[in-house]
Image (cartoon, rainbow, N blue to C red):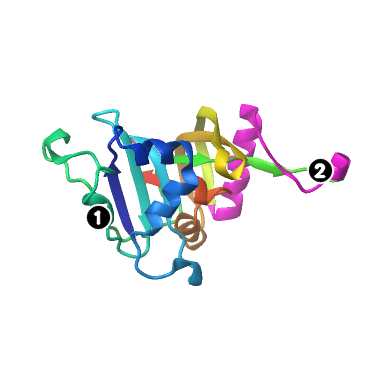
Amino acid sequence: MYLSRLILNPRSRQVQAEIAHPYEMHRTVLRAFAEDLSQTRERVLFRLDVHPRTGLPTLLVQSQTGPDWSHLAAGSYLLPPDLLPPGEVNPGVKEVELAFRPGQMLAFRLLANPTKRLGKQAGPDKGKRVGLYRPEEQLAWLHRKGEQHGFQVLTAIPTAQRRTDDHRRQLKFLSVCFDGVLKVLEPERFLAAVHQGIGSGKAFGFGLLSLAPPR
């Protein structure tokens, strides 16, 4: 698996437009891969984050195929080299080999679109997907995802709740960032979830599960 980190140029008009319209960022990300991934089962995940040292917008990308970011390095999309923190590579790409064991504890971050489908009582809106706005509902959603994907949520704090709008497609998404600690219960199911992402809205920057040793 490959993890990429791209520090974006906040002055770039393309970057500004794609922050407002995340599906366009999704299309930019996919141009880093030569083959048509729609014909495969591979899921490329991305998340717009904030660089911990500079506060600049940073694009995190997870893929099972090695990316080629040359289409971005030649333009103004990425932060210029002379403005980068010392020792920073942009874009930075590393290959990782994931292996999990039962009982393993990991710190995690997940930007998610927690939703539910309306039932029969909703009448004509039956089956419509709606956002979960109360923290207790969001945490219950995350615990259900853990049961579904082979892990147990030990601690989690939902933060950065906001609406992500994509005006071009007339879509609105509830965006919630979960930070916490989880325990791996079923390594194979958990690994599959890491590869495929958690929840809905993956083409709009949701679902990438970042993992690290707990502090």
Q: Decide which of 195, 144 is in the foreground and name it.
A: 195
Q: Are marks 2 and 1 in contact (CB under 8 Å)?
A: no
Task: Name the spot of residue 185 as percent of width and height, x first.
Answer: 51, 53
| Residue bearing mark 1 | 94
Q: Decide which of 146, 7 is in the foreground and name it.
A: 7
Task: Name the spot of residue 165 as percent of width and height, x first.
Answer: 55, 36
> At 60% across and 53% down in the image, what residue appears?
148
Q: Is residue 18 above or below residue 135?
A: below
Tell me the kind of residue under disc 1.
Lys
| Residue bearing mark 2 | 125
Figure quadrant of residue 136: top right
> At 33% across and 59% down in the image, what residue appears?
32
Q: Earlier in the sequence, mark 2 or mark 1?
A: 1
What secondary structure do most residues of the magenta stretch adopt?
Answer: helix
Q: Label 2 to label 1, Cα distance in Å?
A: 45 Å
Label 1: how many residues lie within 10 Å, few (<14), some (14-19) or many (20+)? Answer: few
> Residues in magenta?
121-150
> At 36% across and 51% down in the image, what residue appears?
61
Label 2 residue SS: helix
Residue 66 lies in the magenta-colored region: no
> At 63% across and 45% down in the image, what residue appears?
144
Residue 125 lies in the magenta-colored region: yes
Tell me the kind of residue under disc 2.
Asp
Task: Name the spot of residue 138 as percent of width and height, x first.
Answer: 61, 34
Count of labels shown?
2
Q: Quadrant of the N terminus?
A: bottom left
